[in-house]
Amino acid sequence: MVGIETAEDSQTGGRGGRSSNAGNATDKALNLLEAASAPGYPHRLGDIAATAGVPKASAHRILQNLVATGFLASDGAGSYSPGPRIRALAARITQGCEEDQVMRAELEVLGRRIGHTVHMGVRTGDAVTLLVKVSGPNAVQDSSRVGQQLALHTTAIGKCVLAGLADGELTALVDRSGLPPRTEKSLTDLAGLRAELAKVREQGFALDDEENELGVRCLAVPVRDAKGAVVGAVNVSTITFLETREALVGWADTVRTTAEALHGLLG
């Protein structure tokens, strides 16, 4: 099987829990825009600033500029949500986007072949964001949704991303975000995570064995950009009482075929 090589130049940066050094002015504005547009909006100023890692006074000034330019909207009581310009931008990107059409078409084929729910997710800061979700004919309704952000260390997609990082990048990310548990099966220590990621690189796929949600087991294969860096992964999600771990691992090559078809699609 093809393993995952470490990408020294993998993207860094982050979301919740990052240090106060949030980068230059552009980095701060983009981090704040991302935090304010996260699901569950409107979000309060303090929460947005904490998530973006930007001091509250600076965050307030930048957010006001984003409101003035139409990228965010304010309710006048200290909370913010996506504005008309960011909504229009999102619509322009997704409407008729060839890359989105290719991703969805490939995942629909995969979903039909395997029968369960499949996702395409990418790294966004210190989290994974689901871009595409397709439910196969045997899929059980679950809580995942497009746009949802998930932890890197508890998900199969996230482990694929982490396995592509240099060790220094991994350490810095864990210092920022920690390894909070989602279930009693979550990996919560750096040594254990390193050992898990070594297995991911060796076998070329990652497993989430009820580490993010009890009763749900997932397998993911990395998706790379044109330079070979891991930007995300394709996964298949199963319910533990319907499919065994062995059956899930048996689909690794099938999922890999889909992941390879998406190579270079995201940069």
Image: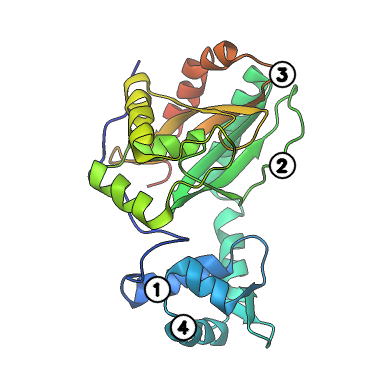
Q: Which mark is residue 143?
A: 2
| Sequence-wise first label, 3 or 4 | 4
Q: Which mark is residue 28?
A: 1
Between circles 3 and 1, the one closer to the viewer is: 3
SS at circle 2: loop
| Sequence-wise first label, 4 or 1 | 1
Q: State the residue at coordinates (30%, 53%).
A: 172
Q: Can the viewer see residue 264?
A: no
What whole-number distance in Å separates the C-alpha atoms at marks 4 and 1?
8 Å
Above/below status of 82 relative to 104: below
**In this view of the protein, which residue sits in the foreground, 163 or 253?**
163
- Give coordinates of residue 254: x percent, y percent: 51, 18
| Sequence-wise first label, 2 or 1 | 1
Task: For label 4, count other residues whose C-alpha is less than 10 Å away and answer few (under 14), some (14-19) or many (20+).
Answer: some
Q: Which residue is mark 3?
A: 241
Q: State the residue at coordinates (35%, 77%).
A: 25
**In this view of the protein, which residue sits in the foreground, 108 or 189?**
189
What whole-number distance in Å separates the C-alpha atoms at marks 3 and 2?
17 Å
What whole-number distance in Å separates the C-alpha atoms at marks 2 and 1?
31 Å
Q: What residue type is disc 3 on?
A: Phe
Q: What residue type is disc 1 on?
A: Lys
Q: Quadrant of residue 54?
A: bottom left
**Display coloring:** rainbow
Locate the N terminus by quadrant.
top left
Q: Which residue is mark 4?
A: 62
Between circles 3 and 2, the one closer to the viewer is: 3
Above/below status of 185 relative to 91: above
**In this view of the protein, which residue sits in the foreground, 251 or 168?**
168
120 displayed left or right of 142: left
Q: Badges 4 and 1: C-beta atoms under 8 Å apart?
A: yes
